[in-house]
Image: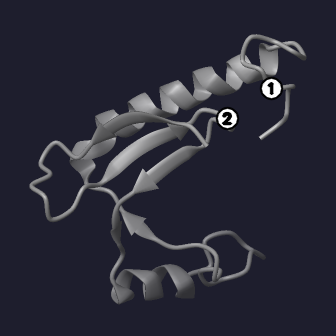
Amino acid sequence: MDLTFIGIDPETTGGGSPTAWVDEDTADLVIQGEEADQSLKSQISETEWVPGHDRGIPQHENVIRIPARMVPILRRACDVAEQRARLRRAAPRGSADGCPPGDA
């Protein structure tokens, strides 16, 4: 998997490093951040955010906290991901990116 580095928390001092990347193959955002504390996880788990949707945090997922100061970095990551996804959809089979459309 190849990642495009987008940015790191501008206030990183070495004790943590919230970071954003875009997966070059899937255009997915890849985010590193501080794991939410138990109080926040409980609030999220116990609230019905979407009617009829399961409550709780699935075992394969986690809740992370991203500092507000990273909003410009996340906007850029979203723009890069959106552009990469558009290019993947537009690329014909056997194109320059070397991947048939839809391959991850």
From the image, tell me which residue sits under label 2.
Answer: 25
Q: Which secondary structure, mark 1?
A: loop
Identify which residue is drawn at 32% across, 57% down: 66
Q: Which secondary structure, mark 2?
A: loop
Work out which quarter of the rendered image holds the C terminus and state it: top right
Whether the residues at callouts 1 and 2 have beta carbons within 8 Å, the answer is: yes
Q: How is the image coloured?
A: one colour
Identify which residue is drawn at 68% across, 27% down: 85
The amino acid pointed to by label 2 is Asp
Compared with 93, 43 (above or below) is below
Residue 99 numbered tag: 1
- Left-right relation of 25 to 31: right
Identify which residue is drawn at 45% across, 88% down: 42
Compared with 13, 89 (above or below) is above
Along the line of sight, the residue nearer the viewer: 96 or 56: 96
Residue 4 numbered tag: none
Identify which residue is drawn at 79% across, 14% down: 90
Along the line of sight, the residue nearer the viewer: 64 or 45: 64
Q: Which label's residue is closer to the chain start, 1 or 2?
A: 2
Specify few, some or many for label 2: CA neighbours under 10 Å numbering under 14, 14-19, or 20 or more: some
The amino acid pointed to by label 1 is Cys
- Left-right relation of 53 to 55: right
